[in-house]
Amino acid sequence: MNELYLLTPAHGSGASARGRASLPLSVTAVLTDRLDDVAVADTAARLAVRHGFPLLLVAVLPPSPWPTPRPDGPAARAVLARVLPRVGRRRLGYIPVAYQPPVQRGSRLRAATGLLDLAARHRSAVVVASRDGPPGLDADTLGEAAAIRGGPPVHTAAPAPWTPLVTPSPVAVTTGPGEAQPGPFAGKDGRSP
């Protein structure tokens, strides 16, 4: 009989008890309130759909001496708001989690190890992060910390390609010598604003 058991604290006591694993494997998306969050969420969603796992959406908040915020608090909701419409379109299950890196200075891998511990508690099969994340939580640092602690593996999300905004020119179109027609932004009298 191949069943997975986790050591979990019994309800109402500090003792450990053997209990069945109730959490499915998940794919973790590290969201750092940057433009790359959309690419990270899309990459994590593709992996989750491929393997049939839910998403663990980790909203990384700035370090603070106050207690860890709730995932339904205003700061975490602001970070998650950018990606939730895209996750909803794929009809994926997701678990929102807030993570605050430690305030105290430690090793450069301290924040990454804390985030990977959070992902491991939620049985993450893979962590998806941006290459250009904040110091200590970028994909390279997370990958290094994962190699030292033995997993979960880290996947780097490629940033979305930058495309310049294209706006039409408000210049008048000339049809012949001395004749000019109003451009696309001309007012009622034929002149540009």
Image (spheres, rainbow, N blue to C red):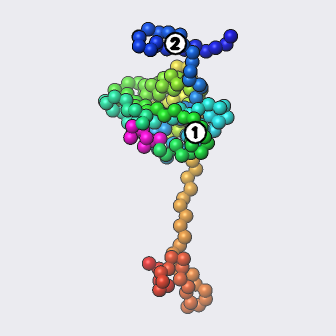
Q: Is residue 153 visible?
A: no
x, y percent for residue 188: 48, 83
Which amino acid, by three-letter code, is at mark 1? Ala
Q: Which quarter of the figure is the N terminus placed in?
A: top right
Relative side of 30 to 72, left or right: right
User: Which is the main secondary structure of the residues drawn in magenta?
Assistant: helix
| Residue 79: in magenta span | yes
Residue 166 sits above or below residue 30 on the image: below
Residue under label 1: 157
Relative side of 159 to 68, left or right: right
Q: Which residues are magenta?
A: 73-80
Q: Which structural element holds mark 2? A: strand
Residue at 55% across, 91% down: 178
Which amino acid, by three-letter code, is at mark 2? Leu
Marks 1 and 2, Cα distance to the nearest angstrom?
A: 33 Å
Relative side of 185 to 107, left or right: right
x, y percent for residue 75: 39, 40
Relative side of 193 to 84, left or right: left
Residue 145 sits above or below residue 170 on the image: above
The tag on residue 7 is 2
Dot in front, 1 or 2: 2
Q: Which structural element holds mark 1? A: strand
Residue at 41% across, 11% down: 13
Residue 91 sits above or below residue 190 on the image: above
Q: Which quarter of the figure is the C terminus placed in?
A: bottom left
Q: Is residue 150 visible?
A: yes
Q: Residues within 10 Å of mark 1 (few under 14, many from 20)?
A: many
